[in-house]
Image: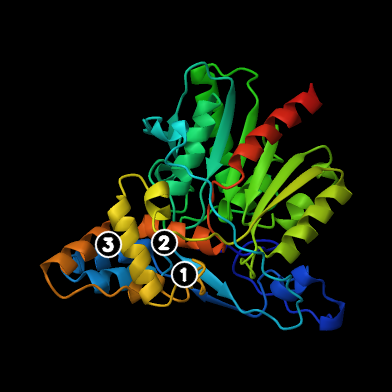
Amino acid sequence: MTFLPTLRRGSLGGVSVTNASDDDLTPREEIYGHPESTMPRRCSTLLAVSGLILVAVALAVSKHRTAVEAITAVGGFGLFERTVQDDAVQWPDAAEPVELASWRTDPRSKLPLLMTVETIGNVTVAYQKPSRARRVLLLFHGCGHDAEHFFQLPEERIVVRKALTEHYITVAFSSKDRRSRCWDTEWPPEQNEDIKAVVAAFAAFSARERLGSMPVFALGASSGGQFVTVLAHSMQLAGIVVQVAPGLEEAINTPAAAGRHVAFVHMTNDRNWASPVVIDESAGMLKKSGASVVSFSCAPKIMTDTVLADRIDDFTPSLSAKVFGMLKDAGVVDWRGVITDDPRSGLALSRLQFPDDDAGRALGDVVLLYTPALQEELNVLYSAHEFTSEYFDDLLRWFDDVLKASS
């Protein structure tokens, strides 16, 4: 995900100033402001309409470096917000980098993805049904994304393939706001336009597909993660997965959360909006409210010359090796294979140096073609605020455990 939506009380737009002493603030409040604030404190936001990205690409097809810079400058495939770190917050030490498990050799990587896209009510839905469907997984994107991206971007495709293999009908939704492409996190849910639209759309889908009492889980990332914590108050969900998001405070810090099953997936280098400190505080709130909570922490990954080909469909091993070599030459990747700077702030792809000849231009054009996927994978390797397929096998087992405990 490339945009970090605001943890807020009430609707976006107003600012409430309080006189609370900074000494009395929790880590969550230190970053986002006192609980009575409606906007985060000490934040700076960079917004760019994703349509401008497409314009930049169209204008720069023959000037691949410019196009890559234009895309990476706004964080890849959407929008992002940077929150200034505060020295008063004690961040945990960085986790040791780990190797990614091979995906290319996983039999599930060969499963064909056959996305169906339609509009149900006024909501765009992308879905695929497995043979012998037995459960449902609802998917909610982050800002700057669409339902279709769950069938187009590499990490999302891995999740969908794994879910289909386990006989989950995968149903992805697009937010109503097609400008920022963020989800409405208005509270209470009765006043939330996206909640009303999604609930109605899924009810129609469920009736048409005769899903009956099939268990339903929901997974959301970033803005989508905030959204599913609200959705859980309006739909019968067996469990929710909140990726790289702390959850809307009103939705998690309430007795109404009692009995819910919540899994957090966060990243150790995500030190702003969904830092490990803030995720721990959210988990504590939920447990205090009576919810069952598990948490998974994603450490930085070791980049190799084959990892991009292993994760991105149609990305050849030779291209993966070339991009890896250029990133090392540019100082983006150190001797261990670890990305040393935030791929967003460091504009990693823009630092690639292509030879000024036909071969170099051809290579640049290929890299440009894969820029959204490359940006996503670099963010995952760095482990900072991105949709990830890591731990999804564990989450599938957690889904099983949730249903066993409820039976």
Dot 3 or dot 1, earlier in sequence = 1
Residue designated by label 2: 375
Q: Position of residue 378 (x, y in %)?
A: 46, 62
Classify 10 Å Cα crowding around label 3: few (below 14), some (14-19), many (20 and above).
many
| Horizontal and vertical percent position of residue 160 | 48, 36
Query: Which residue is pictured at 63% across the width and 34% down the height?
Result: 396
For mark 1, what is the residue? 343
Whether residue 36 can be seen here: no
Determine the secondary structure under disc 1.
loop
| Residue 126 makes an appearance in the image | yes
Q: Quadrant of the C terminus?
A: top right
Q: Residue furthest front?
A: 335
- Check whether the beta carbons of the residues at disc 2 and disc 1 lie within 8 A of each other: yes
Q: Is residue 48 above or below residue 258?
A: below
Q: Is residue 169 left or right of residue 348?
A: right
Dot 3 amino acid type: Leu
Front residue (pair 269, 240): 269
Residue type of the residue flagged with mark 2: Gln
Q: Residue at x 80, y 27 (%)?
A: 405
- Asked if 263 appears above or below 4 in the picture, the reply is above
CA gap, disc 3 and disc 1: 16 Å
Compared with residue 88, is residue 193 higher up or lower down, i.e. above or below?
Answer: above
The percent coordinates of residue 308 (x first, y second) are: 39, 54
Residue under circle 3?
368
